[in-house]
Amino acid sequence: MPPTRQNGTPAYKRIQESILKRIEAGQLKPGDAVDSERELARLHSVSLMTARHALAGLEREGMVERRRGSGTFVAPPKIHFNKLMSFTEQLASRGLVGSSRVVSCTIIEEQPEISARLALPSGTRLLRIERLRLGSDEPFALETVYLSATAFPGLTRARLERSSLFSELEREYGVNLAHADEEIDATSADHRIADLLCVPRGAPLLRIRQVIFSSSGEATLYVLGLYRSDRHSLLIRRFR
Amino acid sequence: MPPTRQNGTPAYKRIQESILKRIEAGQLKPGDAVDSERELARLHSVSLMTARHALAGLEREGMVERRRGSGTFVAPPKIHFNKLMSFTEQLASRGLVGSSRVVSCTIIEEQPEISARLALPSGTRLLRIERLRLGSDEPFALETVYLSATAFPGLTRARLERSSLFSELEREYGVNLAHADEEIDATSADHRIADLLCVPRGAPLLRIRQVIFSSSGEATLYVLGLYRSDRHSLLIRRFR
DNA sequence: AAGTGGTCTAGACCACGGC
DNA sequence: CCGTGGTCTAGACCACTTC
């Protein structure tokens, strides 16, 4: 009597989803006890190891905490540190709405340094998009993104003004972004940047250069971001 | 015939250690195939699930990659992103040796903002240590650390000049640091900072404020770091 | 076809926490 | 004491990759 499968979804995932649903619905609040392994096994007609596997997965994702001898409990809501999020998502997670202005959108031919960072041959045609990020109608960042023009044909300025680049890539080109390596330092505003960001010349800016990789491991985007340090700071969590 | 235990060490951990040992010894190089689940089970006289558990753990830690239908392989050496390291450790990981100079070491009484960040009552006596960090005899950072003077009695300037603060805390006070939450932005050097760091006044600096937590979850250190952006940049990896 | 990892069973004993 | 999570067994079938 083997087949515990339904719909091709593994049993442990169905169990995880059923728990996650109850957390999202607010039926289970942080600190509340989740069904024990044995209860889950009984409720879902599944062996103990399978129920364990489900809980272990949720623990890895930080959704629950397991305490030996005591039980499994919903973990406190976590701030999403070190999460790769689009501009839109970042603001949404803080309950804000922002806007963007495309400053320029051009194709460049020779930018060997950036091609190299994207692991492309040095003569590759690159799309270069400069966007000013605004929060409550005040500029706080200038982001310049580079991506292969041949890999993403038809990515027009108009489409970028409507939709976020992340969702455009995911919806239209089937590219799922997975992680980003970032190099962070400080710089100061030159004349042009100062004007765009409405800060005095020489004002300190946070500079973030990121290479964003797709889930297949390809370097997909190179982003140079300049952030007004008076209106933005980066939150990071590091582990020992 | 249950007891697969020896020395109280779980079987899956013994298996992990035996694999890790072979990796560290260089017998297994990145890309090499690790024994399969079935082989491990046979070699260690253990069930398949236990061998699986061992490999799954190593995969979570990033030591191996598992490919369905193909095998388990030693993962490429990873740069340690988002790792909380002491100044000494950071330099050592790049093969460098640095030095520190204690600029000041005082006890302060009233610093409600910092006490609050450390979850201490606002009148608590705090130890405040200012250290200049040098690499190849040139200054590149000024770090100011605050910690409870009562929780860490006898932490003298002399001891800090000999040893790293991290190892001092771990060895002498049994405090294991676990993670840090950091807030990163940019600022510019005022007169005093500019002198200490040997940069022109107004030079852009990377500012990192971190609250470092012990493994028991207590906020233990508050560190304000100012980094010369021409000599230091922060590397971060973010995940979707 | 052979070998791999992924899922799963139906039990077992142990170590720990709270009552 | 009882219930919890932690470890473990000795198998099974499936999905996938490689040859």
Image: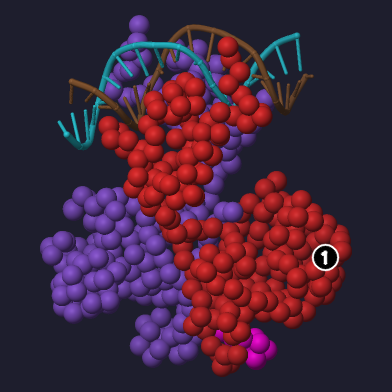
Chain colours: A red, B purple, C cyan, D brown
Disc 1 element: loop
Classify 10 Å Cα crowding around label 1: few (below 14), some (14-19), many (20 and above).
some
Please tell me which residue is depicted at 35% across the width and 40% down the height of the picture. Answer: A33
Residue A195 lies in the magenta stretch: yes
Please tell me which residue is depicted at 18% across the width and 70% down the height of the picture. Answer: B121
- Judge whether A212 appears above or below B125 on screen: above
- Judge whether A170 appears above or below B208 on screen: above
- Judge whether A89 appears above or below B55 on screen: below
User: The N terminus of chain A lies in which quarter of the figure?
Assistant: top right
In which chain is the residue bearing label 1? A
Mark 1: amino acid: Leu
Place residue B119 in its image quadrant.
bottom left
- Residue B4 lies left or right of residue A158; in this view the side is left
Which one is nearer the viewer's eye here, A75 or B239? A75
Which residue bears the numbered disc 1? A155
Which one is nearer the viewer's eye here, A161 or C18? C18
One can see residue A104 in this view = yes
Please tell me which residue is depicted at 39% across the width and 49% down the height of the picture. Answer: A29
Please tell me which residue is depicted at 44% across the width and 23% down the height of the picture. Answer: A42
x and y, in percent, of residue A41 in the image: 45, 25
Residue B154 lies in the magenta stretch: no
x and y, in percent, of residue A97 in the image: 59, 73
One can see residue B137 in this view = no
- Residue A222 lies left or right of residue B85; in this view the side is right
x and y, in percent, of residue B134 in the image: 39, 71
Q: What's drawn in magenta, residue-wise?
A: A186-197
- Residue A13 lies left or right of residue A117; in this view the side is left
- Residue B43 lies left or right of residue D12; in this view the side is left
Place residue A78 in its image quadrant.
bottom left
